[in-house]
Image (spheres, helix red, strand yellow):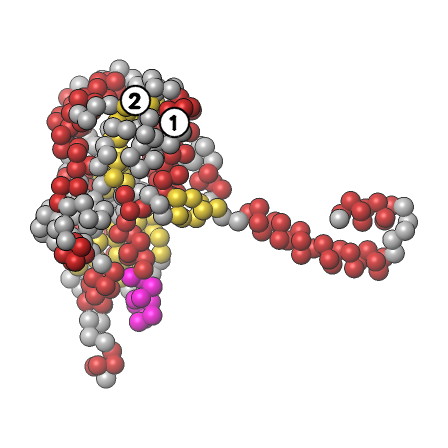
Amino acid sequence: MLSIVRRKVFDGSFTAAALGQSLQRIRPAIAAARSYSSAIKEMTVRDALNSALDEEMSADPKVFLMGEEVGEYQGAYKISKGLLEKYGPERVLDTPITEAGFTGIGVGAAYYGLRPVVEFMTFNFSMQAIDHIINSAAKSNYMSAGQISVPIVFRGPNGAAAGVGAQHSHCYAAWYAACPGLKVLAPYSSEDARGLLKAAIRDPDPVVFLENELLYGESFPVSAEALDSSFCLPIGKAKIEKEGKDVTITAFSKMVGLALKAAEILAKEGISAEIINLRSIRPLDRATINASVRKTNRLVTVEEGFPQHGVGAEICTSVIEESFGYLDAPVERIAGADVPMPYAANLERSAVPQIEDIVRAAKRACYRAVPMAATA
């Protein structure tokens, strides 16, 4: 259209009035095209992880992936789809069902300067390999006085899924976060997944990367910046997903989504909740958490792991140690039930935090447990 107008203007066959009418017609089309090109794209967490692996393997020939069914089957959850065809069996290694064996091989490869990404079909199976993760990977840099780096990533789904019973539903965030020498990350969104996995692969230290099976198929907006191959998120830095002034709610992984939905409900009742997506469990971004609590004067922690010695317990301790004088209410912890995960669907739902649990805790912290209408 623009080219037609341009030709008619230059050959003198277009009047000023006609030119104005034509420009009025084409301006909306130009505006629509601009908004379309700058629109934020959506991406599933599965595709975000796949693209991060692909880009890091392309950028660094030392990066390779190993685990059960990561090659021919393209991953139990299709995270490694297309990677075997692109990089070959030397860099996408299908292993036997022996976590202790292939994890030990991965740690040994990291000792010699390679950058293995070890996939566990579920982090429950990492218990078979915990000696290599803790005693071989996490402690070697310290025990060698910094002479040995162990650039390895242990990744896979963590925590509760749906109907898979106690032996496949455990959250290991607190377990691994208790160990010096490890870095522990837990993404929520697609942007988290891309940026944090890239950071984990590039890091010189062992990283435990805790994904969530129920989030793999979830789609999230992804900025143009996050789609760039150089994109990387800092390890040890939380993200404020939603600003608020009445109560701070911390969460990680799938629980961030529940906290955001709880915040919507609380907003309708006049409570402004600030939601912190931890992203990094170790190191923990204590500064962001404490700064938020000093603003809101209240704290609710949310996690799906067991309550005793949990991530929430550590956050509460940090706030009590650093910001106790700012608290206007007792801290609230929301966690999974202190029992092995039940198999029955109704009991399983009772064993993991729900949106209504977060809402009730926030209202207790704000002394709004009883509806205002009932007190009038």
In the structure shown, which secondary structural element does the residue marked by tag 2 occupy? strand
Residue 194 belongs to the span the image colors magenta: no
Task: Say what amino acid the circle numbered 1 marks.
Answer: Leu
Which of the 4 image quarters holds residue 186? top left
Look at the image and give the residue range highlighted in magenta. Answer: 262-271
Q: Which residue is drawn at 57% across and 46% down?
A: 37
State which tag comes first along the sequence, 2 or 1: 1
Pointer 2 residue: 93
Q: In this view, does 222 lie to the left or right of 23?
A: left
Q: In this view, does 241 lie above or below 66?
A: below
Q: How many labels does the image show?
A: 2
Q: Which mark is residue 83?
A: 1
Front residue of this view, candidates 118 and 278: 118
Residue 279 image point, x, y percent = 29, 44
Can residue 328 be seen here? The reply is no
Quarter in which the C terminus is drawn: bottom left
Residue occupying the point 21% across, 54% down: 302
Q: In which quarter of the image is residue 372?
A: bottom left
Quick check: 27 above or below 49?
below
Task: State whether residue 282 is above or below residue 220.
Answer: above
Residue 340, horizontal then vertical, whole percent: 10, 48
**Mark 1 secondary-structure assignment:** helix
**Residue found 42% across the figure and 44% down from its top:** 43
Q: What residue type is labelled 2?
A: Leu
Horizontal side of 71 relative to 231 (left or right) equals left
- Residue farthest to the top, as pictured: 112
Q: Give the main secondary structure of the magenta stretch.
A: helix
- Taking depth in this image into account, of 116 and 89 the one nearest to the observer is 89
Residue drawn at x 38%, y 34% as measured from the top left: 50
